[in-house]
């Protein structure tokens, strides 16, 4: 059975970690968001891909990004050179960005560079950036259009959001294998990630929506909203700001027509009839991915519900 | 009084540190070797320039390179990614290479990037790479032609040396200000640096020998060989391997016709007549640059001897 996961950062990383415990990792393809990517002193940083790789390697930082217990000597060194460092890169984390950027500078694609990093970390699943092209998420706010990390890190996601833009997305090409992995999967999972800035950018890549529409897969989405709040990140605030109901039902409405089955948390069980009324199957169970056991339990339940 | 120093790494760095204590730093131009420069995971590393900058900033490592007390978490991170890391870059040191490379990637010259690093470190003298172009030193050995750091670090300078090459040197252009700083200095000092791989590469840059020959400066060389040995580095072994007498006299022969005054250590005082017979003035005094006081003493004595 081939499983393809549309992935953002931390929620997807935890789901994938559980999935690797319950199915052979070689049967998994993660298609990752690159809308958060940034250049950091000339180095190519892919925060979502790194969250996935670090989590799967078991070395993720406490907050879901970076490397656990990392030091920040280079960052302090840059500050001592008078630079305004608002984006935190740890010393061990930096090794990943050096390796990735070195590959890119030698002319390899982001897919190839990602594979090199994943293999070096001992991972056996396939991790694909949705595209090898630049495909940045721009956040429209009352203070103007902001690059994603400018909004999320520099301004701590504290600026009211008006919408999102993906400039040039029509010219972006899906990375090799992306369309096939969506079209020919047995199960396709939209991970419990932010619908606007994690899953949304994936759907903007030409060919991805078509592949999803014509996919042979059982298409499942897992709600990132539990009990009206996001487990992590600004998804709830974004839904509210954009006029969506902040609930699993609100998420289900965003995915209507794209998925066959919607998974929501047991706490939101009362929403099942309304979700089904959108024309999709729906199931409810405990979706909190607490600890290794919790991750595996959720992944197993999602795959069983889809099968 | 304008003082120009032809500089290599550690010996030059210590001499310059002393010089900054005895004359206004703004009157000093250091023209630095870039023959040791290397790309490290895509970052531009200039070891000689960094030795000069770190020493002048008072943060140089114990062995004369890198930053004192630096950590190596990124290096360990790269090793954990399976990479064979034979060149040591510390975490704080890395901040310099990130800043320099970022400037270079934005299209600034190595001179401008060097100035940015020097200013960020609070330095007031002018530090010029001899050229903004690539100008690598190639070490000819019995094991083949080696890039300088491959010879010096990877093989620990343990391979017999047959000679040196500066491929493409005829096309290298001196950096802006280099020729003027040599030609119009009041005092020009060849620092106590390796004649082959520190001062030698400077002389290979088209225009530098001419500027030296027609300079208005009192041209002074300080012997890096004291009592038949180099204070630091492989200069003595290189002299022996290439058939030169391993002594201050041997160094003086290499500089015959290029300098007006040769400074050797008091321990080598007996060589004064032979050095003078080469057609240059010569003086002997304690040239060991031990501690801040020693560096200042040597710099003061050199400037006084030249004046």
Image (cartoon, coloured by chain):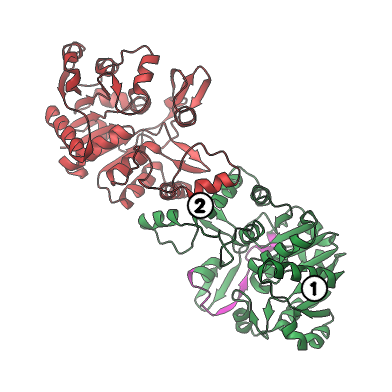
Chain colours: A red, B green
Task: Answer with left or right where residue A12 lies relative to residue B197.
Answer: left
Q: Which residues are magenta?
A: B154-171
Can residue A2 be seen in this snapshot?
no
x, y percentage for residue B76? 40, 57
Q: Secondary structure at mark 1?
A: loop
Q: Which residue is mark 1?
A: B258
Kindly identify the residue that appears in the image at 48 percent across and 63 percent down.
B87
Quadrant location of the C terminus of chain B in the rendered image: bottom right
x, y percentage for residue B21? 75, 61
Q: Secondary structure at mark 2?
A: loop
Kindly identify the residue that appears in the image at 40 percent across and 48 percent down.
A70
Q: Nearer the viewer, residue B39 or A162?
A: A162
> Does the magenta run of residues contain B220?
no
Q: For mark 1, does the 10 Å Cα neighbourhood hold few (<14), some (14 to 19), or many (20 or more) residues?
A: some
> Does the magenta run of residues contain B170?
yes
Q: Are marks 1 and 2 in contact (CB under 8 Å)?
A: no
Q: For mark 2, does the 10 Å Cα neighbourhood hold few (<14), some (14 to 19), or many (20 or more) residues?
A: many
Check the image and name the residue furthest to the front.
Answer: B293
Q: Is residue B124 above or below residue A132?
A: below
x, y percentage for residue A64? 34, 38
Dot 2: chain letter: B
Can residue B185 be seen in this snapshot?
yes
Q: Which residue is mark 2?
A: B42
Q: Earlier in the sequence, mark 1 or mark 2?
A: 2
Quadrant location of the N terminus of chain B in the rendered image: bottom right
Q: Nearer the viewer, residue B101 or B116?
A: B116
């Amino acid at each position: 059975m081939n499983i393809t996961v549309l992935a953002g950062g931390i929620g997807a990383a935890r789901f994938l970690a559980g999935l690797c415990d319950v199915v052979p990792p070689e049967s998994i393809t993660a298609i990752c968001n690159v809308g958060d990517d940034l250049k950091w002193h000339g180095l190519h940083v892919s925060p979502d891909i790194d969250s996935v790789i670090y989590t799967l390697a078991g070395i993720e930082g406490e907050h879901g990004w970076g490397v656990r217990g990392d030091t920040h000597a280079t960052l302090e060194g840059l500050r001592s050179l008078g630079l305004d460092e608002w984006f935190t890169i740890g010393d061990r984390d930096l090794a990943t960005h050096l390796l990735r950027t070195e590959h890119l500078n030698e002319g390899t694609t982001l897919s190839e560079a990602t594979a090199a990093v994943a293999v070096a970390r001992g991972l056996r699943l396939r991790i694909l950036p949705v595209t090898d092209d630049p495909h940045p998420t721009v956040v429209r706010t009352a203070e103007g259009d902001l690059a994603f990390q400018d909004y999320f890190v520099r301004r701590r996601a504290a600026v009211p959001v008006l919408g999102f833009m993906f400039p040039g997305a029509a010219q972006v090409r899906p990375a090799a294998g992306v369309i096939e992995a969506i079209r020919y999967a047995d199960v396709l999972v939209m991970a419990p990630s932010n619908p606007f800035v994690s899953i949304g950018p994936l759907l903007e890549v030409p060919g991805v929506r078509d592949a999803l529409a014509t996919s042979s897969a059982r298409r499942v989405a897992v709600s990132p909203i539990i009990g009206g709040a996001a487990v992590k990140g600004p998804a709830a605030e974004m839904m509210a700001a954009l006029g969506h109901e902040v609930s699993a039902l609100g998420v289900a409405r965003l995915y209507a027509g794209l998925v066959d089955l919607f998974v929501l948390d047991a706490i939101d069980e009362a929403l099942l009839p309304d979700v089904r009324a959108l024309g999709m199957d729906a199931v409810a169970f405990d979706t909190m991915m607490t600890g290794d056991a919790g991750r595996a339990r959720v992944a197993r339940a999602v795959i069983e519900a889809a099968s």
